[in-house]
Image: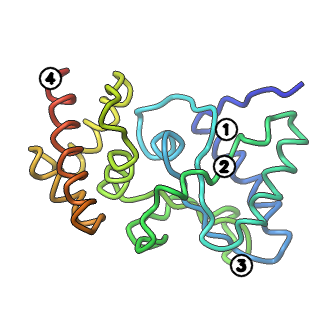
């Protein structure tokens, strides 16, 4: 039987430190970027707990996956407690540390372990909006996340959001989709204010 983990900020950092120890046994430093609710838990007060972690290793994903499996077995967690499924939504031109902020170095020694990054807010906002389906209404939690990210990214109108989305996405088809998303997200977030 597997127990689903529930991470607070403190337990997330403790778990990442344990993961760093397992990864560090390979005498390497791995850059790991957190996305989704886990990065918001680590860097903001929007969440008090999360149950899964979306994370992508710049290099060394196999080392991270192996360490994740070890921790899952040790703690009786499902193997999906940390996944890199978010990778399909990432912009190939934006790799950490570009457009990312270093949040933690675990352990503090510079030669091995993990360097944990979170995306800059404007990039996280574009990832979250780009992954949305225009047909699905936003729930209150998603609206709260998007409002927060728009505020800290300086987005004050649908056009600002469209400009930001266009900066990270290219091509005429993408431009039309991003414009439609920008206006749909802006109207849903504005109407619920």
Q: Is residue 151 left or right of residue 110?
A: left
Decide: few, some or many residues near mark 4? Use Cα within 10 Å; few <14, some 14-19, many ≥20.
Answer: few
Q: Give SS at disc 1.
A: helix
Marked residue nearer the N-terminal end (1 or 2): 1
Residue at image mark 2: 83
The label shown at residue 11 is 1
How far apart marks 2 and 4 lie (CA) works out to 34 Å
Residue nearer the viewer, 157 or 108: 157
Q: Residue at x 57, y 38 (%)?
A: 9
Q: Are marks 1 and 3 in contact (CB under 8 Å)?
A: no
Q: Around disc 2, counting alpha carbons within 10 Å, would you say few (fewer than 14), some (14 to 19), or many (20 or more)?
A: some
Label located before the other in sequence (1 or 3): 1
Residue drawn at point x = 72 percent, y = 46 percent? 15
Residue 139, how many percent across, how many down?
A: 36, 23
C-beta proximity under 8 Å, tags 2 and 3? no
Q: Is residue 62 positioned above or below 45 on the image? A: below
- Look at the numbered disc 3 and give the secondary structure of its residue: loop
Residue 75, quarter of the rendered image: top right
Task: Tell me if residue 152 comes above or below residue 37 in the rendering.
Answer: below
Give the position of the C terminus as an image quadrant. Answer: top left
Q: Residues within 10 Å of mark 1 (few under 14, many from 20)?
A: few
In space, the residues marked 1 and 3 are separated at their CA atoms by 24 Å
Residue position for label 4: 191
Q: Residue furthest front?
A: 173
Q: Position of residue 162 (x, y in %)?
A: 16, 53
Q: Which residue was labeled with disc 3?
A: 111
């Amino acid at each position: 039987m597997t127990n689903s983990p529930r991470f607070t900020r403190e337990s997330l950092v403790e778990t990442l430190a344990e993961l760093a120890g397992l990864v560090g046994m390979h005498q390497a430093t791995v850059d790991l970027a957190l996305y989704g609710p886990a990065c918001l838990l680590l860097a903001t007060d929007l969440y008090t707990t999360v149950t899964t972690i979306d994370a992508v290793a710049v290099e060394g994903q196999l080392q991270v996956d192996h360490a994740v499996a070890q921790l899952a077995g040790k703690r009786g967690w499902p193997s999906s407690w940390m996944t890199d499924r978010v990778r399909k939504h990432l912009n190939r031109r934006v790799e950490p540390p570009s457009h990312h902020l270093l949040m933690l170095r675990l352990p503090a020694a510079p030669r091995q372990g993990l360097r944990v990054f979170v995306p800059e807010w404007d990039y996280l906002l574009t990832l979250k909006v780009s992954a949305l389906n225009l047909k699905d209404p936003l729930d209150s939690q998603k609206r709260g996340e998007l409002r927060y990210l728009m505020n800290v990214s300086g987005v004050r109108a649908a056009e600002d959001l469209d400009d930001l989305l266009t900066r990270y996405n290219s091509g005429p088809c993408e431009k039309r989709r991003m414009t439609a998303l920008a206006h749909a997200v802006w109207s849903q977030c504005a109407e619920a204010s």
